[in-house]
Amino acid sequence: MNRDKAWRKGVIVGAVGMVVLLVGLSLESGRAEEAAKGKLPLEKAFPLAAKCKRCHERVYEEWETSPLSRSLHSPAFRAAIDQYLAFSGGKDKALCLRCHAPHIKEYPDLAESFIKQVQSGDPSIDGVACAQCHLIKEVDRTAHPPMPKYDVGSKTLYGPYKDAAPNLAHQSADLDLFRKSSLCLNCHLTVPTAGNLGTSNDLLGSWETSKAVKSGKECQTCHMPEQLGESANGENKRKVANHTFPGRVGKLRQEAAKLEVTSEVQGEKTKVTVKVHSLVPHSLPTTHPGWASVALDLTIKGKNLRTVHTDRRVYGRKYLDAKGQPTVFDFEAVKVAEDTVLKPEETRVETFTFPTPKDTKSFDVELSLNYAPVAGPSAFLQRIEAESPKGAQDPVFEAVPITKYAENVPISK
Ligand code: HEC
Ligand code: HEC
Ligand code: HEC
Ligand code: HEC
Ligand code: HEC
């Protein structure tokens, strides 16, 4: 049987298989209201990632370790969405879900039930999973924010291959979009806030004019790096895309910045100059959630390696709410009080001056650049702790190291 025939046969068997599968699904979880409107039940239109795992084990396992797989049930998100719902007084309930569970756009009536799922802490719906990306057939970049168009009810999954091997579960179609930043921008470009912050609620800054982007790099180049592997179980190895979405997690962050340090002992005083070179083609940090920040920590260790001086610079945004009070919740923000975010590929020069350590021939200068832990009102932090099975050990309470520098500076007499 030639490949063409095998393909057609695959489609027929596949179609039959699909019907059986879909009937099974709708019997199990059909929603009367949706059916009445002639709409597919949610689970049928957006199959769970677990359905794809059967054939795409590698992709599934990578995605499962990524933050995307926890977009609905990270303890910080659960605590933050409640904070938002209290703030908005029940208006625009789906706001956070627009990106954390984007299929809400096709099922706006289910906002209440999605939120109950989030609050349960163990949702049986997916957030940003396979179908939520692979059913996108177009992103309208003229809309603000850019809007995805879903091919709901389609048996076609869109992806990067022109020559996907046929299979029994779905048809495949290639779309250039899957190799382009546009696919990511509908969730990563701007987040709505209460006030009209204009362009100041953009998450990426002027990324389009960065050297990396001008040289042809897309979000995928760095955040879904190319590797060799099986795209589906048992298929030939080929170029595949890493679905762990390296960011705060993973090795990519070692490429985020370089520190160039000069230390000058000037008698009683010492001056340390640090050039922080951001190598990131967009804002560092990206500025959502509102508490997102990167900290540069200086530690000076004198005699017997005792810490004699510490200092810190913070890169992030400080927001004010409608009452003029500082807030870490971007959805409450009406004004940016301070913006120290590192701009795309920016070099920021910091100087630290402190008394030269005494009774020692030399001292240590240590610098570390890290993503800062979550910050906010103590009730909010306690809430995250209560929501997390790891309690105060939840990863959001820990700084994530980006890069470090250390040198021993002699004190010449
Ligand atoms: C439907 C919305 C949506 C789309 C489309 C989307 N993302 Fe995301 N992305 C999210 C959400 C929500 C999170 C945060 C998940 C969490 O931790 O709760 C996230 C997290 C990430 C992270 C991890 C960030 C960190 O702090 O470590 C990376 C990297 C990322 N996305 C890259 C991409 C890339 C690349 C694309 C395009 C191929 C993309 N995303 C498309 C919604 C989206
Ligand atoms: C426009 C899309 C978008 C909207 C709307 C949105 N988010 Fe996010 N959210 C993201 C993306 C993208 C990330 C990952 C950001 C990163 O790591 O740089 C994220 C990350 C987060 C995180 C940190 C990761 C985690 O899960 O702990 C929290 C908390 C969060 N969002 C809460 C909210 C809340 C609450 C709302 C509603 C008020 C909301 N978001 C609305 C896109 C969005
Ligand atoms: C019965 C097995 C099977 C199931 C179930 C399955 N796939 Fe596939 N899928 C395949 C095979 C085989 C390929 C072709 C791989 C190749 O050519 O290397 C493929 C290709 C793809 C592609 C690439 C399409 C392209 O043209 O670039 C995407 C995207 C995809 N699948 C997504 C999914 C998603 C999402 C799900 C779950 C909703 C899913 N698949 C369920 C077997 C399956
Ligand atoms: C945030 C959006 C996003 C999510 C979530 C996502 N993908 Fe993808 N996927 C992409 C993009 C973009 C590409 C193409 C990347 C490239 O070629 O540069 C891709 C490529 C693929 C491919 C072909 C290449 C490969 O790596 O095998 C398959 C198959 C696939 N995805 C299946 C899945 C499955 C299954 C899931 C869920 C477990 C999933 N994807 C989740 C965006 C996503
Ligand atoms: C040239 C490589 C490169 C490109 C292109 C790129 N990034 Fe990044 N990105 C990085 C590096 C490096 C970091 C910082 C280190 C880290 O967190 O891994 C980062 C961090 C991030 C983070 C998480 C960190 C944070 O501050 O919350 C998100 C989300 C993100 N990028 C999204 C995107 C999106 C969306 C695009 C496309 C518009 C994109 N990136 C394009 C290199 C790149």
Image (spheres, helix red, strand yellow):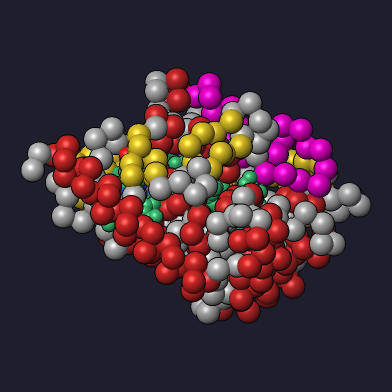
User: Is 194 inside the magenta-drawn segment?
Assistant: yes
Q: Residue at x 53, y 71 (%)?
A: 29
Q: Residue at x 61, y 61 (%)?
A: 35
Q: Quadrant of residue 308?
A: bottom right
Residue 96 in the image: state x and y as whole percent: 67, 54
- Residue nearest the viewer, comparing 296 with 144: 144
Q: Quadrant of the N terminus?
A: top left
- Residue nearest the viewer, comparing 13 with 96: 13
Residue 47 in the image: state x and y as whole percent: 45, 59
Magenta segment, which residues?
Answer: 191-210
Q: Quadrant of the C terminus?
A: top left
Q: Residue furthest right?
A: 323
Residue 409 in the image: state x and y as whole percent: 41, 46
Q: Is residue 149 visible?
A: yes
Q: Is residue 301 above or below residue 165?
A: below
Residue 177 in the image: state x and y as whole percent: 44, 32
Q: Is residue 411 visible?
A: no
Q: Quadrant of residue 78?
A: bottom right
Chief secondary structure of the magenta span? loop
Number of dots carrying numbers: 0
User: Is 335 inside the magenta-drawn segment?
Assistant: no
Left or right of 84: which side holds 249? left
Q: Residue at x 83, y 43 (%)?
A: 195
- Residue nearest the viewer, comparing 342 with 388: 388
Q: Residue at x 45, y 46 (%)?
A: 154
Left or right of 229: which side holds 347? right
